[in-house]
Image: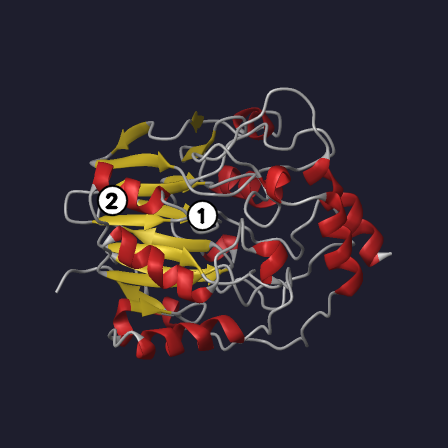
Amino acid sequence: MRNFLIVLLLISNFVMSGETFSNTNQTSFDSERSFGDFLKWRVTRKEPKTVQIETSDQWKQLGEQSKNYAVWIGHSTYLLNNGDLTIVTDPVFSKRASPFSWAGPKRLIAPAISLEELPDIDVITVSHNHYDHLDIASLKTLHKLNPKALFLVSKGDMDLLVRSGIKNVTEFLWWENIEVKNTMFTFTPNQHWSARGFRDRNKSLWGGWFMQSLGYSTYHAGDTGYSADFKETRTRLGSPDFAMIPIGGYNPRWFMSYHHVKPSESIQIAKDLGVSKSFGMHWGTFILTDEDILEPAQLIDQELKRLSLPEDFFRTPKPGELLSLTLN
């Protein structure tokens, strides 16, 4: 039953219907991978053993006056404060990354901070509409708890939120932006795809969020394969001071490489961006692909040593760990 449901969900990748978006190099996932490739992966895959990554309760040190911090809540969800705004990225707090409450990829660890424990939120950003990044139940609860919060989503996804009763939603094409309390939010391209059902593949956009505040800039890369988009982001917007970059979801490479970076490519993205400090995400929360659960962080450490880069150039924080967003 579990494998049948995964096939049912992911078959949408290969169903065409109407006008769609493509990546900046004019390719798309379906042009690079076939449905036969998908079936080959599903039939031959060996899921990793279930283990739990270590978590932290440092976030409990936060107070009402706390500013300039980041906390990895799990997967691609970060809690950020840049001195003017409190932001949540790709909020997924549900037990499963799935349209079903009873089936689909299940969390290995609980969110480091529950929805009810979050501080007041000003802005919620969403990178794309895959279920492990756009969770309607979490967004609805955030809207209920923070009725004045702004929801920034990719082009094509606004209607999904509005139909769910969520207000204050704005959608963006690549390079479009909005200023909120001294912070400029710019939606930037990466290499990925979108789909939530059988007939909506690539009908909404995907990307990352570059957030330029008065003191420094932060960047959430979304979900992505390696591409020239990160050098272009640096050319157009400058180098971010802090970046959140995916490190998991990459095996088997013959199938995943187009839309999910491996750890060495994650570090290359940080170098392409010219970032000062990077933090890992998109690992250790759901079993979505075939690599061992702990492997992404281990490979990041190995690559840093191979390149003689300092440990704080690219960190893999624990969920709940309190990270300082201050420039030395």
Label of residue 222 in the image: 1
- Label 2 Cα neighbours within 10 Å, binned few <14 / some 14-19 / many ≥20: some
Q: Position of residue 109 (x, y in %)?
A: 59, 68
Q: Position of residue 101 (x, y in %)?
A: 74, 51
Task: Tell me where residue 9 sits by quadrant.
Answer: top right
Q: Work out whether 112 lies above or below 132.
A: below
Secondary structure beneath label 2:
helix
- Label 1 Cα neighbours within 10 Å, binned few <14 / some 14-19 / many ≥20: many
Q: Identify residue for label 2.
A: 234
Residue depicted at x 44% and y 35%: 25
Residue depicted at x 37% and y 72%: 58
CA–CA distance in space, label 2 to label 1: 16 Å
**Identity of the residue furthest to the right in this view:** 1
Residue 64 in view: no
Amino acid type, label 1 = Gly
Q: Position of residue 323 (x, y in %)?
A: 30, 66
Tally the numbered discs. 2
Image quadrant holding the C terminus, namely: bottom left
